[in-house]
Image (spheres, helix red, strand yellow):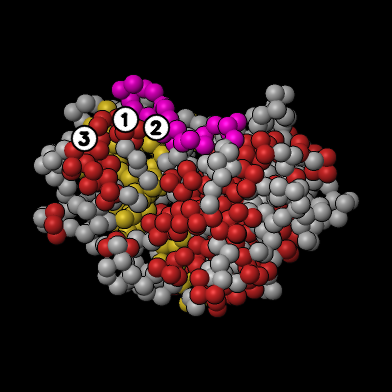
Amino acid sequence: LALAVEAERTSPSQRIAVVAMCGILALFGLQEAQAMRKEAVEAAKLLRHRGPDWSGMYCEGSTIIAHERLAIVDPDSGDQPLYNEDHSIVLGVNGEIYNHLELRQKLEKRAQSKHTFATKSDCEILLRLYIEDGVDFLSKNEVCGMFAFVLWDKNKNLFMAARDTIGIIPLYKGWGKDGSVCFASELKALHKICLRYECFPPGHVYDSKSDQRRLFYTPKWWNGNEVPTQSIQLLALREAFEDAVVSHMMSDVPYGVLLSGGLDSSLVASIMSRHCTRRQETDGKDPAYWPQLHSFSIGLEGSPDLKAAREVADYLKTVHHEYKFTPRQGIDALSDVIFNLETFDVTTIRASTPMYLMARRIKASGVKMVLSGEGADEIFGGYLYFHKAPNVEEFHAENIRKVKQLHLYDCLRANKAMMAWGVEARVPFLDRRFMEVALGFNTKQKMCVDEDGKRRTEKWILRKAFDLHGSRQYLPNSVLWRQKEQFSDGVGYSWIDSLKAHAEQVVSEQQMKTAHNRFPVKTPRTKEAYLYRDLFARHFGENTSAADTVGWQDSIACSSEVALRWDKAFQGRADASGRAVLGVHESAYDAAYKTASQSSGDDPNGGEPSAKKAKTA
């Protein structure tokens, strides 16, 4: 880990905007920071895959803040941590603030000549807003982005930490035996230096002065019991998403899009292809540095996703990169995947392994940032089990449950699988402003039946919003109206089948018989689940704090456990594959298919089971 390097003494006007995805490690309340420096350096090295471009460290008094940087915009400057003028306030950030220019303009208007920005970094606005508005600055300002940050105010003897509302960016909090309080982007950095650690909850801010953790922003959609009834026009939905995608395209290095050939990633790719020739940082006034869009897909030989992605790439005329893998290659990578993902959730590992393999190939191509389609299925009810939603109230409540679980599953997968190889993944469906629109209109427009009770395709409203023709067409109809295919299925049905077959070979009946003794919490009930839990234990211990951070629930086609009650046909078929939804998936498992439950019990009040809940700080 390099020592903290002071930024070049250039004038603010000479500095260029800096955007970086990174790894952060912070230790507060130390007896003597310098005495812990070597140990902190070693811990921060475990995050270097997240930020291979440069390293920085603040180490003074009782505090250490280490930063591993992945530079996306202006790679030659913008090192972190960031400081105020006298270095009494220190900020370490992992993420992107998409509306930083807007926030800066508003700040300069209400506090004229008060703030001197040292850089044009998108992250420095957080430092300046703290100076202006204090620990509640996230509640007083509309900060749009994905982020996790730590801040130290030496003069006030105060530290704070926060994480974006959805939890797109990971953050963990731990406690050392010396009484120190620690934060890190991944739990592996805390595993050896903390007695205990937990997930830091999305949407929250903590400050040491009040010693309180609180929501900094409560979206209008936050309460799943309040069903919106205001209808939306297709144009408004289309424009809101197009704005979200464009806002996520700022970059000074080669970038691309993850393209599975499904609806969500294909819409992202289509919008990007319309805007990739001009720089978004200058409102399209200047030509883009990388004017041709690169798309990436992965699958087994003959997989549905590869075929569909190729069709979309040909239609959009992207520079397409198609990668194939074998089940054996995926199985060989499982241990590394679990170490990087820090989970033993079956669904996540099935989907993360191809993504992890693809990230390595993307990195080799020279691309450092990609946009992806995570979040659409949760927001619009795109998973196949939503066809069984009994009413509009249950449909909407499940939307919100799934959105609030994203940090345990899809966001964790997208971030950590890609960042394992130093590739940043951005998720425009989870843009703050877009979500206010997409979760704020009449839920009846999302349901898989129309007003006459006739069945229609999942995510019908989203598809219809982009169903234009002629020169305005976004996608071929065969893609726009393609049935939902989960990533772990779409890469090739034999991928999941191969994982199950492998687990049958390497996990014994005796191990399953005594699984509850070895793993009394979140006990694996299938051999595949046992395999993943065993690999996880080799990295992070048998029943340590690490296991407490993992989401764990029964699920059918990626449902919450609550939704399993929607249909009797779901009982005994709690497999995350979309093929478990009999009568909806075109290649569903037959009626005889059964699988063991992994839940430790239902909530008698009808809520989420405690087995699912990851401990939060």
Q: Which residue is mark 2?
A: 216
Percent x, y for residue 573?
Answer: 80, 46
In the image, residue 614 lies at what x, y percent?
A: 57, 34
What's the residue at 14%, 54% (across, down)? 12
Q: Amino acid at mark 3?
A: Ile
From the viewer's side, name the closer residue of 194 and 35. Answer: 194
Which sits earlier in the primary sequence, circle 2 or circle 1? 1
The answer to whether one can see residue 368 in this image is yes
Q: Do the numbered discs 2 and 1 sit on residues whose CB atoms are within 8 Å?
A: yes
Q: Check disc 1 and report the residue beneath it.
A: 136
- Pick the residue in front: 20 or 223: 223
Q: Where residue 371 sits: x, y (%)?
A: 46, 60
Q: Which residue is mark 3?
A: 131
Helix, strand or loop at mark 2: loop
Residue 419: quarter of image: bottom left
Residue type (three-letter) at the residue carrying disc 1: Asp
Q: Which residues are magenta?
A: 203-227
User: Is the residue marked by circle 1 packed among few (<14), some (14-19), or many (20+) residues within 10 Å?
Assistant: some
In terms of secondary structure, what is the magenta stretch mainly?
loop
Q: Position of residue 93 (x, y in %)?
A: 33, 45
Rendered image quadrant of residue 116: top left
Q: How many marks?
A: 3
Whether residue 78 is situated above or below residue 315 in the rendered picture: above
Q: Residues within 10 Å of mark 3 (few under 14, many from 20)?
A: some
Is tag 2's residue or tag 3's residue first in the polypeptide sequence?
A: 3
Tell me the residue at 41%/34% (across/down): 217
Q: Pick whichever of labels 3 and 1 is earlier in the sequence.
A: 3
Is any part of residue 173 visible from this angle?
Answer: no
